[in-house]
Image (tube, rainbow, N blue to C red):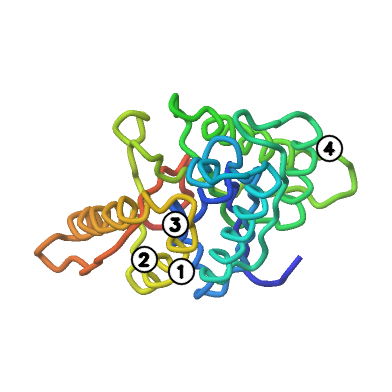
Amino acid sequence: MSDNKTALVISAHSADFVWRAGGAIALHRKRGYDVTVVCLSFGERGESAKLWKQEGMTLDKVKTARRKEAENAAKALDVHEIQFFDVGDYPLDLGRETRDRMVDVIRKVQPGWMMSHSRWDPYNTDHMNTTQFALECRMIAQAWGHNPGEKVLGAPQLYLFEPHQSEQMEWKPNVFLDITEVWDRKRAAIECMQGQEHLWDFYTNLAENRGNHFRRNSGGQAGGRDARYAEGFQAIFPQTVDELP
């Protein structure tokens, strides 16, 4: 484990970390964090329609293409480490083997904070199942009786990143992160996702809208920060503070 500050992003499919947390990743890398990304699948069956429409496409070819996209995006964001579990998608295989593997990663990384999907997503159950999976793995990593002798996990915050159709997901952000200074990195990562080009402008517009929300909640026209781009998150666990901000 590095002596640097650490963070862990658990992504159901190989593009999710880019759309929903690319700014947070790039910003915290710039702040000196070692940010690890785990992609549970490549989204090869359910999130690669553009590739499947090409003549002669196979599952292996799709997975290879999606992996390359994710690796390029991770490079654009300066990700410390990206891992591909390749457990299949639609649905994800989140059984005991995958869970134990994830717990091992969590204990190795010892993240100061974690990120994953929204808790409700009827359009894509892979997403909400990943969040339940992340919560379970966080809990197991804290258990002294799981693989005794290993360093147990503390109590990292779990931030839930924004789903694709927020209004339909009962998702309400309580944290806004200004990503203006790293927006160029996020946009570059977005453009690595050639298989889902239809989402590029959607997530650019979303970042602009969240920038508006950041400005409003940081003071608006009465001295608020002029954030142009932001990401929204839900924090699951209470904050522990010595002074109220």
Within 10 Å of disc 1 (Cα), the crowding (few <14, some 14-19, many 20+) is: many
Question: Which of the pair 84/193 is nearer the observer?
Answer: 193
Within 10 Å of disc 2 (Cα), the crowding (few <14, some 14-19, many 20+) is: many
Residue shown at 60% from the left, 63% from the top: 35
Mark nearest the camera among 1 and 3 is 1
Whether 238 is drawn above or below 2: the answer is above
Q: What residue sits right under mark 4 in the picture?
A: 146
Q: Are marks 1 and 2 in contact (CB under 8 Å)?
A: yes
Mark nearest the camera among 2 and 4 is 2
Looking at marks 4 and 3 on the same chain, the residue that comes earlier in the sequence is marked by 4
| Helix, strand or loop under label 2 | loop
Looking at marks 1 and 3 on the same chain, the residue that comes earlier in the sequence is marked by 1
Asked whether, in this view, residue 241 is left or right of residue 148, the answer is left
Q: What residue sits right under mark 2 in the picture?
A: 179
Looking at marks 2 and 3 on the same chain, the residue that comes earlier in the sequence is marked by 2
Q: Residue 20: x percent and y percent?
A: 44, 51
Residue shown at 56% from the left, 32% from the top: 126
Which label belongs to residue 27? 1
Q: Amino acid at mark 4?
A: His
Q: What residue sits right under mark 3 in the picture?
A: 242
Q: Amino acid at mark 1?
A: Leu
Q: Residue 111: x percent and y percent?
A: 64, 56
Measure the C-alpha gap from mark 1 to mark 3.
Answer: 25 Å
